[in-house]
């Protein structure tokens, strides 16, 4: 007698978790909020519709991250290749230090170019 309501609640909970953890590009026909609203208002019908129509089945599912969306990229062009990506923490720190040095040198160049005065202010080339 208590088994049927627990089953419906479990289906509702599993469906809501699945909708919420999906990325926006893995949701079809309605925005996520629309699916959540449909599932909450009509739990059994909403759950069936979600798993048949709303969920994208063909793509590899990756957990949703609340960080930078560039981390969600799955194509090879969006992610650095294995050869160019540093693997250890020390290598990553060394790469960051090199970037800081380069930025500092570029800033020095900009400051020197801005502070240099023309050597010959007169168009004739003669100084007095």
Image: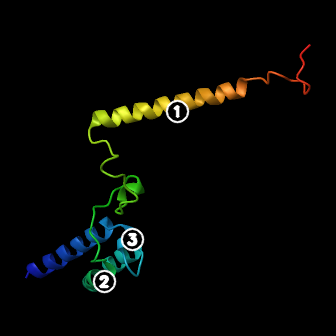
Q: Please state the horizontal and vertical placement of residue 29, each as a whole percent of the image.
A: 40, 82
- In the picture provided, is 119 more to the left or to the right than 41? right
Q: Please state the horizontal and vertical placement of residue 15, each as a whole percent of the image.
A: 25, 74
How packed is label 1: few (under 14 Cα within 10 Å), some, or many (20 or more)? few
Label 3 vs 2, first from the N-terminus = 3
Mark 1 near mark 3, Cβ–Cβ under 8 Å?
A: no
Q: Is residue 72 or residue 114 the one in the foreground?
A: 114
Q: Does 1 appear above or below 17?
A: below
Q: Quadrant of the C terminus?
A: top right
Q: CA distance from mark 1 to mark 3?
A: 36 Å
Per the image, the residue denoted by label 1 is 103
Q: CA distance from mark 3 to mark 2?
A: 24 Å
Per the image, the residue denoted by label 2 is 42
Q: CA distance from mark 2 to mark 1?
A: 57 Å
Q: Which mark is residue 25?
A: 3
Mark 2 near mark 1, Cβ–Cβ under 8 Å?
A: no
**Residue at the (32%, 84%) spot, across then down:** 53
Marks counted in the figure total 3
Label 2 vs 1, first from the N-terminus = 2
- Farthest residue in the front direction? 125
Q: Is residue 58 or residue 12 the one in the foreground?
A: 58
């Amino acid at each position: 007698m208590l088994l049927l309501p627990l089953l419906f609640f479990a289906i509702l909970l599993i469906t809501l978790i699945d909708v919420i953890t999906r990325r926006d590009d893995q949701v079809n026909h309605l925005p996520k909020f629309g699916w959540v609203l449909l599932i909450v208002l009509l739990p059994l019908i909403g759950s069936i519709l979600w798993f048949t129509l709303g969920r994208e089945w063909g793509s590899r599912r990756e957990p949703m991250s609340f960080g930078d969306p560039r981390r969600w990229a799955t194509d090879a062009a969006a992610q650095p290749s294995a050869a160019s990506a540093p693997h250890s923490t020390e290598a990553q720190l060394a790469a960051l230090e090199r970037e800081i040095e380069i930025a500092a040198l570029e800033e020095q160049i900009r400051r020197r170019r801005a502070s240099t005065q023309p050597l010959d202010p007169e168009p004739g080339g003669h100084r007095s």
